[in-house]
């Protein structure tokens, strides 16, 4: 009887262990000294973890050209934040490849010595945002919760979670947390022509958006600071190319000679963005250094 009871007890313990392994677990704190940047990831079991980023992109504010106005706004807001002063959640929108996410990375490197840290969260994991906020609530550091290339389709769960944590929930982000997001969409949700039919007109000429439009506008309005980015002109693009080529130690004479090739490179890609300029500079510097 005792042996049977022992076997039954052992099987029960094994079963409990299996059940516990698949049940949601509280989000644990990582080693905060391991990095200045962290990623929130979901394991196959469904457990969320904060992983330190071992190789943080070494982007500097001085590397970013032709976006001085946007840089000034983001830098000022970030300085207020790390100093413990009131600061706004940030939405960076506009043309692709113009430096939106690079500007956030550059600010991280600039202000990390003052205690700034970054937590990158995928759009699909925004439903766990309250858990992340709870984990960092008592930390002395200042955290940018960063979501890159943010946009939602109708009905996605992360949309409601982000909307609540920004403004409107009983449980709000703490004073040491700032939400930063980049997007190619100003209002973060798809907009359709039929939605224009929901606008109403009053007798005195006022125009009021319908409920569907109001819902889509309401999320982006909860970001206190909007920063817009625009496509670069040809001269701006070439200026960025020259800056990146110089960073790769390409001589000034070669930089001038590379201008026609840089324009062809942009034409082939259909874009004069900062990203395209950086990619050309890497290709040019690498291929010319390899020549005897």
Image: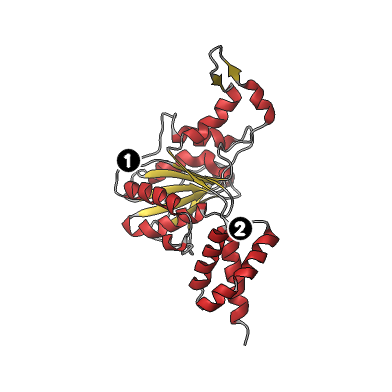
Find residue 94 and report its horizontal and vertical position in percent: 55, 46
Residue found at x 56% / y 11%? 203
Numbered disc 2: secondary structure: loop
Which residue position holds label 1?
Answer: 86
What residue occupies the far bottom of the structure in this picture? 292
Quadrant occupied by the C terminus? bottom right
Q: Residues within 10 Å of mark 2 (few under 14, many from 20)?
A: many
Report the mark closest to the observer, 1 or 2: 2
* Residue 16 seen: no
Q: Which mark is residue 268?
A: none
Find residue 225 and report its horizontal and vertical position in percent: 43, 40
* Looking at the image, residue 198 lies above or below residue 290: above
**Residue 113's image quarter?**
bottom left
The one of 155 and 266 positioned closer to us in this rendering: 266
Q: How many marks?
A: 2
Quadrant occupied by the N terminus? top right
Find residue 127 and report its horizontal and vertical position in percent: 53, 38
* Residue 246 seen: yes
Residue found at x 59% / y 21%? 210
Indicate left or right for 269 with 164 as reference. Answer: right
Q: Are marks 1 and 2 in contact (CB under 8 Å)?
A: no
Residue found at x 61% / y 21%? 199
Which residue position holds label 2?
Answer: 272
| Cα–Cα span, label 1 and label 2 | 36 Å
Dot placed on the residue nearer the N-terminal end, 1 or 2:
1
Residue found at x 38% / y 51%? 75
Numbered disc 1: secondary structure: loop
* Looking at the image, residue 228 lies above or below residue 215: below
Q: Residues within 10 Å of mark 1 (few under 14, many from 20)?
A: few
Find residue 162 and report its horizontal and vertical position in percent: 50, 37
């Amino acid at each position: 009887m005792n042996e049977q009871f022992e076997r039954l007890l052992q099987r029960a313990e094994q079963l409990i262990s299996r059940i516990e392994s698949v049940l949601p677990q509280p989000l644990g704190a990582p080693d905060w000294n391991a990095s200045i940047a962290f990623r929130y990831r979901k394991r196959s079991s469904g457990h969320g973890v904060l992983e330190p980023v071992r190789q943080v992109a070494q982007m500097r504010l001085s590397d970013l050209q032709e976006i001085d106005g946007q840089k000034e706004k983001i830098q000022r807001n970030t300085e207020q934040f790390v100093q413990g002063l009131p600061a706004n959640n940030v939405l960076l929108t506009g043309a692709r490849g113009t430096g939106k996410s690079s500007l956030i990375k550059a600010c991280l490197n600039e202000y990390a010595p003052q205690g700034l840290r970054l937590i990158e969260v995928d759009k699909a994991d925004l439903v766990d945002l309250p858990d992340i906020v709870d984990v960092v609530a008592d930390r002395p550091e200042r955290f940018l919760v960063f979501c890159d290339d943010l946009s939602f389709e109708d009905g996605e769960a992360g949309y409601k979670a982000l909307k609540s944590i920004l403004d409107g929930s009983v449980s709000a982000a703490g004073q040491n947390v700032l939400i930063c997001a980049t997007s190619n969409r100003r209002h973060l949700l798809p907009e359709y022509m039929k939605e224009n039919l929901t606008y109403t007109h009053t007798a005195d000429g006022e125009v009021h958006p319908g409920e569907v439009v109001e819902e889509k506008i309401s999320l982006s309005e909860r970001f206190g600071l909007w920063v817009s980015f625009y496509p670069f002109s040809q001269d701006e693009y070439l200026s960025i190319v020259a800056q990146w080529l110089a960073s790769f130690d390409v001589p000034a004479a070669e930089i001038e000679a590379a201008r026609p090739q840089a324009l062809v490179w942009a034409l082939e890609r259909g874009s004069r963005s900062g990203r395209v300029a950086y990619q050309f500079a890497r290709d040019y510097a690498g291929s010319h250094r390899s020549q005897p």
